[in-house]
């Protein structure tokens, strides 16, 4: 078990370009979360998958953002027409379904995005 | 209104001393869970400890304990016998069981500096 992995670790792009991030959760984990973290702040929830179903999306997730989790394994987060305000750390976390409270979310190392 | 408030942007503690990191929360949901995470400079979020709203006893995990005062809506993290490796950002977080869906809400964090 190598933990949650994310790729790439760093991404620099120009405004208006599209970017895609990948998250590979811990293999037996059926829950997957995406968060965004800006400098000096805590992570903000973006979206949640249970297996392949996207069950919850934050209002932070504008129509430029789309996330998928085909076959309930890895997940991708795509940002279209990036803006400078999208610059942040994008964190992925996975967990095993143990009810809504006590689950432990295991986080990946994050993808740091810089939009020029 | 802020759901999670961490009023200490930074804290210093002498190695081997105990330190308390403050967290207050705001919810009208009777069912909720409270979490603490550590984020070293590498960026990865590490789960430390969990407290459920119906738990009668304060949670403990090794050198970490959670001072849960339900009536005051506080969930302070106590780290005993601080080590240099404890220097990191610490985030308090909450999930609301009936109203919050799958969203975990994080505070802004407290940066802990452990002095040798």
Image (cartoon, coloured by chain):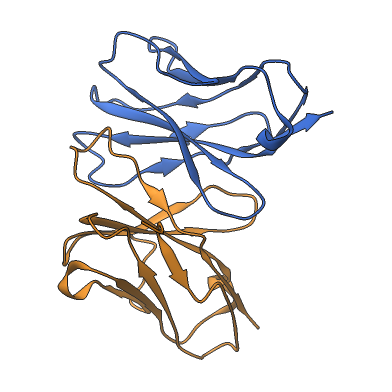
Chain colours: A orange, B blue
From what the image shows, is residue B17 above or below residue A53? above
Query: In the drawing, does residue B13 fall left or right of residue A106?
Result: right
Q: How many labels sit on residues?
A: 0
Q: Position of residue B116 (x, y in %)?
A: 84, 28
Nearer-the-camera pick, B86 or B94: B86
Q: Which residue is pictured at 36% across the width and 71% down the height?
A: A62
Q: Position of residue A60 (x, y in %)?
A: 39, 62
In the rendered image, the residue lying farthest to the right is: B116
Q: Which residue is pictured at 74% across the width and 33% down the height?
A: B84
From what the image shows, is residue B63 above or below residue B9? above
Quadrant placement of the N terminus of chain A: bottom left
Q: Position of residue A109 (x, y in %)?
A: 51, 60
From what the image shows, is residue B94 above or below residue A80? above
Nearer-the-camera pick, A35 or A3: A3
Rendered image quadrant of residue B21: top right
Query: In the drawing, does residue A4 fall left or right of residue B23?
Result: left
Q: Position of residue B103 (x, y in %)?
A: 31, 47
From what the image shows, is residue A40 above or below residue B29? below
Quadrant placement of the C terminus of chain A: bottom right
Q: Which residue is pictured at 34% across the width and 75% down the height?
A: A76
Query: In the drawing, does residue B116 fall left or right of residue B96?
Result: right
Q: Which residue is pictured at 30% across the width and 71% down the height?
A: A75
């Amino acid at each position: 078990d190598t933990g949650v992995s994310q790729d790439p670790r760093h991404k620099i792009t120009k405004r208006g370009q599209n970017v895609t991030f990948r998250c590979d959760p811990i293999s037996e984990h059926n829950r997957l979360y995406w968060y965004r973290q800006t400098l000096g702040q805590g992570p903000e929830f973006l979206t949640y998958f249970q297996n392949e179903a996207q069950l919850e999306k934050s209002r932070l997730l504008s129509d430029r953002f789309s996330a998928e989790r085909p076959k309930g394994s890895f997940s991708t987060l795509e940002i279209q027409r990036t803006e400078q305000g999208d610059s942040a750390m994008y964190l992925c976390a996975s967990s095993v379904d143990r009810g809504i409270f006590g689950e432990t979310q295991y986080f990946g190392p994050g993808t740091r995005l810089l939009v020029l | 209104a802020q759901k999670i408030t961490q009023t200490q942007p930074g804290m210093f503690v002498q190695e081997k001393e105990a330190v308390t990191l403050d967290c207050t929360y705001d919810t009208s949901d009777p069912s909720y869970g409270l979490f603490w995470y550590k984020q070293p400079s590498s960026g990865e979020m590490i789960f430390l400890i969990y407290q459920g709203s119906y738990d009668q006893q304060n949670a403990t995990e090794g050198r970490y304990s959670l001072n849960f005062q339900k009536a005051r809506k506080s969930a302070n993290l106590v780290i005993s016998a601080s080590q240099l490796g404890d220097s990191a950002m610490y985030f308090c977080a909450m999930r609301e069981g009936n109203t919050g869906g799958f969203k975990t809400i994080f505070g802004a964090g407290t940066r802990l500096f452990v002095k040798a």
